[in-house]
Image (tube, rainbow, N blue to C red):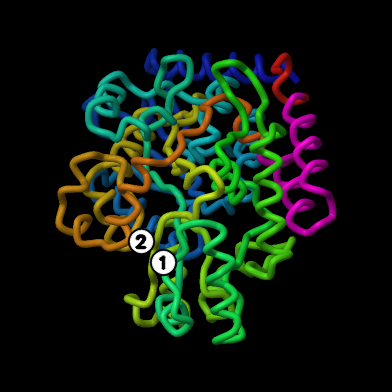
Amino acid sequence: MRRGIAATALVAALALAATACGGDTKDGGSSGAKADGELSGTVTWWDTSNDAEKASFQKIAEAFTAKHPKVTVKYVNVPYGDAQNKVKNAFSSGSEAPDVIRADVGWVADFASLGYLAEVPADTAKKVEGEFLPQAAASGKYEGKTYAVPQVIDTMGLFYNKKMLADAGVQPPKTLEEVKTAAAAIKAKTGKAGLYLRGDDSYWFLPLIYGEGGDLVDAKTKTVTVDNAAGVKAFKAARDLVTSGAAITNATDGWTNMQTAFKTGEAAMMINGPWAVADAYAGDQFKDKANLGIAAVPAGSVKAGAPQGGHDLAVYAGSKNIAAANAFVDYMTSQEVQVQSAKELSLLPTRIAAYEQPDVKSNEMVTFFKPAVDKAVERAWIPENGSLFEPLKVEYTKAVTGASSPEDAAKAAGAEFRKILKGWK
């Protein structure tokens, strides 16, 4: 495996060297640029946005040709759940690989460590340092170099149906204990569930472990912490929400089930992020957008905490159209595009100045999530970040559904983490 990775990195380096020397490309120009500096050729972008977002992003991406008429943008939507492995396979083989990818912030260090990503041009990297939110900029770095430009940033909050809570006479709960109290009142008044807890995706475990004062790992000391006392409490908290009747869950297709339950009023609350706002508005319960409320994630026994998430744009190191690909990334992360995405999709910009624009300042969802992002827990930007979530998902689902005890789930997750993070305590 290491030999294959090294070979791929070498091929990418040779491709970069060839384009730097003015070699021909399949599009008839050097790295997509002719002698006069005009960009040309095709830029293939693999976008991982969801069904409610992809039409908007495709329209924005293809509008790049208005600025560069001789560049064709090939838009490909890749389902998020399949994307990490699909991108790795494409990059490792070099066959049909995209020029630009929309990467989860947790994937950048992994792709960069394998030699798959081109370093961001110096002038762009300087802008990322000075013009973007610092926590967003951090996600695009690996070993002191910048390999990706932040496109959107996010965190999680408590989505709630204002009418259902008002009818039950309860306020948005601030703690997990209050969730149980509110859920009982909602059930008594409406016959519906209080909370839909997504039990098949480990990202939804993070607010629970942060709420108990824990974390998955401590990168500074190279210590696995998912199975310590705080981790066990987090698995217990997840199971308790279900056994107490405060939450309903499903171990399969959790996203669709959660969204459907919330949009139809079968559940009054869910934990989600800005990426879910556009889809929530499409539900019968939120034809009046004012009925959608957002509050901070409920606190555990220690505090309230939600993860910093988001997506970055990165260029494949083996791209035959590096110049056009970099220009496309600059365009897609421009203030103009970020403001448009905030207006149309309620997604949070990564550019600091974008928050002063009227269409951003007037967006209620953005104005809620921005302070939440500023308080969000920054994850460990290590190459193995994305690899930890699959074994965690397995154990989280077992704990939520009762297939495993919280103690056993935590222990098993810790053991799998140490297999991935070789040499860690």
User: Local crowd at mark 1 within 10 Å, few (<14), some, or many (≥20)?
Assistant: some
Task: Kindly identify which numbered label has been placed on residue 333.
Answer: none
User: Local crowd at mark 2 within 10 Å, few (<14), some, or many (≥20)?
Assistant: many
| Residue 321 counted in the magenta span | no
The span shown in magenta is 389-418
Residue 260 visible in the displayed image: no
Q: Secondary structure at mark 2?
A: helix
**Front residue of 224 and 80:** 224
Query: Quadrant location of the N terminus?
Result: top right
**Residue linked to disc 2:** 345
**Residue linked to disc 1:** 278
Q: Amino acid at mark 2?
A: Leu
Q: Secondary structure at mark 1?
A: helix
The picture quadrant where one finds residue 388 is top right
248 in relation to 135, above or below: below
Question: Residue at the location (44% across, 43% down)?
Answer: 310
